[in-house]
Structure formats: structure tokens, C-alpha cells
Amino acid sequence: MKIIITGVTGLLGSYLARAFRDKGELFGLKRPTSDQRLLGELADQITWYEGDINDLSLLEEAFRDKDLVIHAAGLVSFDEKDNEKLLMTNTQGTTNVVNAMLSSGGGHLVYISSVAALGRDHEHVRLNENSKWSNSELNTPYAISKHLAELEVWRGSQEGLNVMVFNPSVLLGKISDVRSSAGIYKYVLEGNKYYPKGSINYVDIRDAVEIMSCLVKKGRWNERYIINKECISYKLFFEKMAEVFGKKAPSKPLNGMMSSLAVGWVKLYNLFGSRPIALNRQMLQLAQLKISYDNQKIQQILDHRFIPVTDTFRWAIAGSDEGYLWNP
């Protein structure tokens, strides 16, 4: 089997490459300047196509004769300056992937989306694969870009592609990975005092790729799957993390008055990366919400045993150089 992964040099893409390397011949799409460190020696076992996700002719060439396309490339940002980039990369890029596959003869497409693409509002606090998108002030530009991208994937399904859509929650990797969950680890490692009153949905990245791999093997196509371990309060999440890291947990709740004062000057590290961004009202609202994502569908299919979160934190920090996290 010939498998190509877009975004293979990213955090999830690199773990997916390891999960699928024994299942066939690996191909990857990357920019000429992409950092391949997360792949390690596996980078030498991948046949590369170099270019941009918005180069349709390149995609058509790359997808030709491939049995499986895993589309993991995308932009994660909550910076308002990146709104146009989000649409160009996530929505238009996915449109190009779908069109290129259709032009190249169809095939099987795995699309890595996000739980954000399910939409959020104040009325629905527990979401599953059947939840319907609703327009809401709580939907970030990132969420909108992924929702629109999903519409393109489902269009591809109607036009003959076999598709599988995965909606992962916050992915917990290693501190040394620097990307993704490195920011939320840093929040505790730096000894910050405040915690949001809302809840966090998360999954160990090793669980995520194992679940994705198993579902692809089962061949349950043209369906959506939420990839999430559980939903717990930020308070408890940070307490468990702090205990493993040997740090003091954030102990003061972020209340409404403090939230309004925070806008414009507080800087947090978002849950998906280590780049500091200005905290805005929409992000503050989201951090205070208690929305959970139901994982019953994957449990009924796989009966998967998730890694305990304390084991995830021990694995995350094991062998890491904290200085590397602070200065990537």
C-alpha cells in the first residue's frame, strides 16, 4: 500500500508516520523549509514531494497511484492576524486536496480535523459526532476554517471518495516535541497562579494515533470520529500535572472581573503551541466553558484503554530539557 501524509513534519503528522510506516510505502508532502526533526531517522525512509498545499498540480502528481491520503497539514492559530491564513491553509488547502484526489482517480482520504469544527454555543454542553454546527460568537476563526474544510471533505465523499474524518481534542505530546501541548505544560512549569473555571478535553497523542490507525484498518469509511479521552476541569488537570512535574498548581480561579481586566495585556500560551498571543474576549469565554466531547462511538467500536493522564505527564517530561522548552 502506498500512503502519503500531508503535514508529516508536524507533531501529529510525525506520530502518524510512525504508526503507518509498517503498513506500506510512505510518502510525504512538505515545504522546502520544513523542519524534519520530529521524524528523526524516519525522514530518510519517506519519499518526498516538496511544495505548498495550495499547489494543485503538485497535489495531483503526489496523490496519483496512492492508496491512502492522510491530510494532516493545517494551521492552528488564535491570533486575529492569521484569519486569512487560516482560510487559505485549512479551507482552501483541503479543497485542493479533495479536488486533486478526484482528478487523480479518487481513493481513500483521512482528514485530521478538530473538535473545534463541531462548533460551540452556550446551549449544548456535550457534543458527539451527530452534533450540528451552529453559528455562534464562540466559534473562533480557526474553528470556522476547519468546519468549512470538513464541508469540502464531505463533498468529496459525495463525489466518490472514501473519507474518514477525525476530530481530536487537545493532543498531549512530549515537552521535547516543543509544539502542540508544550504551551500548556509551560503554563504550569512557570508557576502561574490562575486557572480558568472551564474544562479541558484532551487525549494522549499516542492514544490518538493508535485509535486512528485501528479505525483505518477496520475500514469504517464515510464517518466522523471524535478522538478524546475525557473532559475534566482545568483546576484538576493542572493539579495532576503539577504533582507529576513537582510544581505548585495554579490555585486561584479566573473570575469574570479579572477576565475583563485581562483583555489587552495578559499573554497566555495557547493549547496548541508555544507562540505567545494576546488574550482576547473570545478565548477567555472559551476557557470558562464546560463543554465536553463524547467518545462513546470509538469506545463502542474499539473498547480502547486510554493512558492515564498522570502517565502521560510522566512520559511528557521524561528525559526532557526544560530549557529547550523555553527557548525553541
Image (cartoon, grey):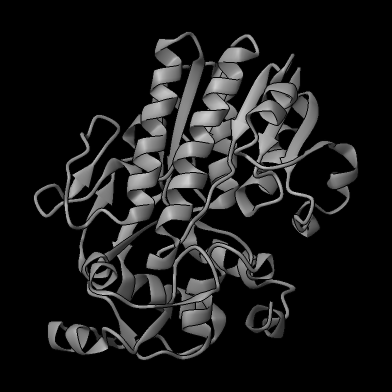
- Vertical order, 144 against 242 (above or below): above
Residue sitting farthest toward the left:
123
Nearer to us in this view, 94 or 319: 94
Horizontal side of 273 relative to 51 (left or right) equals left
- Vertical order, 221 against 317 (above or below): above
Q: Residue at x 23, y 84 (%)?
A: 253
Q: Position of residue 291 (x, y in %)?
A: 23, 55
Horizontal side of 197 relative to 308 (left or right) equals left
Q: Residue at x 76, y 58 (%)?
A: 35
Q: Position of residue 168 (x, y in %)?
A: 44, 45
Q: Residue at x 69, y 76 (%)?
A: 328
- Vertical order, 165 against 37 (above or below): above
Q: Quadrant of residue 58?
A: top right
Q: Quadrant of residue 59?
A: top right
Q: Residue at x 53, y 85 (%)?
A: 189
* Residue 18 visible in the picture: no
Q: Position of residue 319 (x, y in %)?
A: 74, 73
